Image: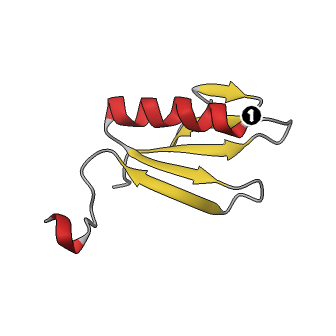
Amino acid sequence: MSRDEHHVVPNPDGGWDVKRNGAERSSGHFERKSDAVDYGRQVSRNQQTEFIIHNKDGKISNSDSHGNDPCPPRDKK
């Protein structure tokens, strides 16, 4: 079973997409990465999913947990 996640990923045709894992279509397309991150973070909070931000090369640059974190920090138990 995969985690519920939203990703900010580069679009091959330019700009940035916000996609839920497993979805073929994006839930939003933006010219600027910062706009995609703002929108994706809001969606992730509302749906309590993991939020993962990718660089232009596709590698993960940052992530946040807005749901049930499977690996909470030791001081947050």
Taking depth in this image into account, of 25 and 17 the one nearest to the observer is: 17
In the image: residue 72, left or right of residue 35: left
In the image: residue 11, left or right of residue 38: right
How packed mark 1 is, by other alpha carbons closer than 10 Å (few <14, some 14-19, many 20 or more), is few
Q: Residue furthest bottom?
A: 74
Residue drawn at point x = 69 percent, y = 27 percent: 29
Residue 21 position within the rendered picture, expressed as x and y whole percent measured from the top left: 50, 44
Residue drawn at point x = 65 percent, y = 37 percent: 34
Q: Residue 24: in sight, yes or no?
A: no
The amino acid marked with disc number 1 is Arg
Residue drawn at point x = 58 percent, y = 38 percent: 37
Q: Residue furthest left?
A: 77
Residue drawn at point x = 62 percent, y = 25 percent: 28
In the image: residue 14, left or right of residue 68: right
Element under disc 1: loop
Residue 52 position within the rendered picture, expressed as x and y whole percent measured from the top left: 51, 51
The answer to whether residue 1 is above or below residue 21 is below
- Residue at label 1? 32
